[in-house]
Amino acid sequence: MTRGPAAIALVTARAARDLDEDLPPLFAALTRAGASVRVVDWDDAETEWSNFDLALLRSTWDYSMRLPEFLAWVEHASAATHLVNPPAMVRWNTDKHYLGELMRAHVRTVPTSFVEPGDDAAKAMNEFLVLQAATDIVVKPAVSSGSRDSQRYGRRELAAATQHVERLLAAERSVVLQPYLDRVDADGETALIYFGGTFSHAIRKGPLLRRGEGPTADLFAAEQIAPRIPRADELRTGARAVSASCCCGVPPSRRAARIRRILPAAIRPPVCRAGRVRRHCGVWEQRWRCGCTSIRSISSAASAVNCR
């Protein structure tokens, strides 16, 4: 029996369709390779996901604002088709508490403290500042994307930073406190891209949080992206992060083998191009928009996992 073309869903969100600059070239590349491709909103109630061989999370960038609904959809879609990445990885990586797990696994990360609803914001902030000597600090929600609701503060802006924490806690949102790594302003951050657990290539992301600027009001903060050759220590840290992430119980090698069986032989993973890579809710750090499915952000300044 002759198998028809692979049916692939590139999953996005209504608000992101016109912002995902990588959707058109990815769509074209898959089509040229012989696949039957559709761009589908993740919350489209009319979509029958079992009609697809593969659903690739591309630009579901509103997930952090609708997390319970999004995770319910992930379970539904993964029961009907092969979802990239798998539900366990998606759940784990949508909440920045995974940084605590990476720290406990001895993966080098940006020092991170969490403030939970019900905690005293002022006390938590003071305790954090005692531990961290950084000139600037970052306040962000534990569940967030696109740098929304994230802001950089100087140590003299303690009152404003504390008020930011209080606002998030009042909305029942867990809060992440981190020192701002000054060298990011000059060096940027390095994103390491993996296919099936194997390193493919890297990109540089310019600084996003600037002193004196409030959080973005857009779906995601504008980014400056360029190719980068990672250092050996960055690759080692990335490998440790990938290994630690397998606590989700989804071995990368198995995911890769499954995808190879589904896709036509002519299809190859798309290569990021400077100027076309933007922010992405992929799901493996689901933060880069480059057609890739396995990504971890590593701070080039400190060789530390620093996923925004």
Image: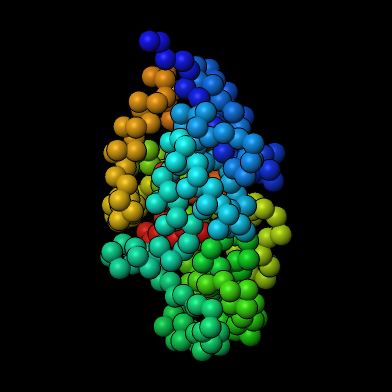
Query: Is residue 228 in view from this perspective?
Result: no
Of the 4 image quadrants, the one containing the N terminus is: top left
Residue 57 falls left or right of residue 267: right
Residue 49 falls left or right of residue 243: right
Query: Is residue 294 in view from this perspective?
Result: yes
Where residue 62 appears, x then y in whole percent? 62, 52
Q: Quadrant of residue 19?
A: top right
Residue under the image location 54 percent in, 21 percent down:
36
Where residue 256 appears, x then y in whole percent? 34, 35
Q: How is the image coloured?
A: rainbow
Residue under the image location 57 percent in, 38 percent down:
11
Residue under the image location 63 percent in, 73 percent down:
171
Asked whether 33 or 47 is in front, the reply is: 47
Residue 19 falls left or right of residue 227: right
Find the residue positioned furthest to the top: 1
Where residue 239 appears, x then y in whole percent? 30, 50
Residue under the image location 42 percent in, 24 percent down:
263
